[in-house]
Image (cartoon, rainbow, N blue to C red):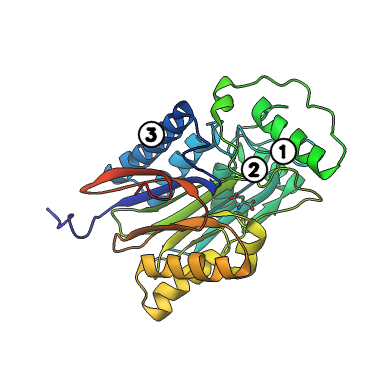
Amino acid sequence: MTDSASRPRWAIVVHGGAGVIERARLKPAQEQAYREALAQVAQAGAGVLEAGGSALDAIETSVRLLEDDPLFNAGLGAVFTAEGRNELDAAIMDGATLGAGAVAGVTRTRHPISLARAVMERSGHVMLIGEGAEAFARHDGQEAAGPGAFFTERRWRSLVNFLTAEGLPIPAKPQATRDNPKAELAHDEGKHGTVGVVALDMAGHVAAGTSTGGVTGKRWGRVGDSPVIGAGTYASDRACAVSATGAGEYFIRLGVAQAICALVELKGLSLQAAVDEVVQDRLTALGGDGGVIAVAPDGQMAWSFNTSGMYRARIAEGRPLEVGVYKDDV
Ligand code: ASP
């Protein structure tokens, strides 16, 4: 028996995006749908860890569920580019080896997080983009997504509203689309969102994974922070594992995820102090909004966000599941 009350052997933290998430704006059915989804995803990852599975396996399992859930801006339910496409970004990092894999601008692979893991494990590279990433995905046997596979009416409406407000042309609606009714419960928390998971396994290793559709109306091959190792995703057993969500342009410039790990490793900050310093102080001072989740090899779990809400959940050995949506939740 370990002293799991003070030091859990496994832990997992999940996020489903940060933004304008306020009690007055969410209908009870929406809030309930988010809470249920987050709880399910955290518990699925916890099941992997509890059975002795690796942090990487727990992350892949949990992120795939989030990618399949139209409530979240990743995989099915991803936001649209100004050209009316879903261009997906994802990354995964192994804190034990500093191995990392990332993909950007993916359009035809059902689970970008699994493709990112394949990049890490089998490509000999760290980051693949666009058509090259798709070619590697087919070569590797990753599940392909047909035309319209990520489409939801809900996100299409957000695109039309965004382009109308910006005075930009509205592209033709993608053909061969079938809507997913659950997507109607998706809340518009601004124009972005992302999913991410960090985990500690019983071997003492941490890992991080992030997957996103990016921001509504993005143009010109824009890539956010999520697949940029050190910005939206980072993991090192010497410090911690971090996954971010928010206005990617700011997270890239601050190297948010790596900065948090550096504060833990080099300055000896507690995990909560480190995430707060980078999010509440540095990110806020630069004018960026969003949040992070983090876990450390000693079982510390933390989150921090400067928006009104962040979809989040955490659970560890001997600790109850906690689910949060609004700032004052947990
Ligand atoms: N960080 C993501 C991006 O900039 C979006 C988000 O998390 O809201 O692509």
- Res. 235 mark: none
Of labels 3 and 1, earlier in sequence is: 3
Which residue in the protein does label 2 denote? Answer: 213
For the residues labelled 3 and 1, the Cα–Cα distance comes to 26 Å
The answer as to whether callout 1 falls within 8 Å of ligand 1 is no
Label 1 environment density (alpha carbons within 10 Å; few <14, some 14–19, many ≥20): many
Residue indicated by mark 3: 40
Q: Is residue 316 left or right of residue 124?
A: left
Query: Which quarter of the figure has residue 273?
Result: bottom left
Res 95 visible: no
**Kind of element beneath mark 2:** loop
Lower sequence index among marks 3 and 2: 3
The kind of residue on which mark 3 rests is Gln
Residue at 14% across / 58% down in the picture?
Answer: 3
Q: Secondary structure at mark 3?
A: helix
What amino acid is at disc 1?
Phe
Residue 80 badge: 1
Q: Position of residue 5 (x, y in %)?
A: 17, 55
Quarter-wise, where is residue 171 in the image? Answer: top right
Answer with left or right where residue 1 lies relative to residue 155. Answer: left
Q: Amino acid at mark 2?
A: Gly
Q: Nearer the viewer, residue 159 or 7?
A: 159
| Residue, far front | 24
- Outermost residue, left direction? 1
- Tag 3–tag 2 contact (CB < 8 Å): no
Q: Are marks 1 and 2 in contact (CB under 8 Å)?
A: yes
- Residues under labels 1 and 2: Cα distance? 7 Å
Q: Is mark 2 within 8 Å of ligand 1?
A: yes
* Measured Cα–Cα span from mark 3 to mark 2: 21 Å
Q: Which residue is more in the foreground, 301 or 140?
A: 301
Dot 3: within a 10 Å radius of its alpha carbon, few (fewer than 14), some, or many (20 or more) residues? some
Q: Are marks 3 and 1 in contact (CB under 8 Å)?
A: no
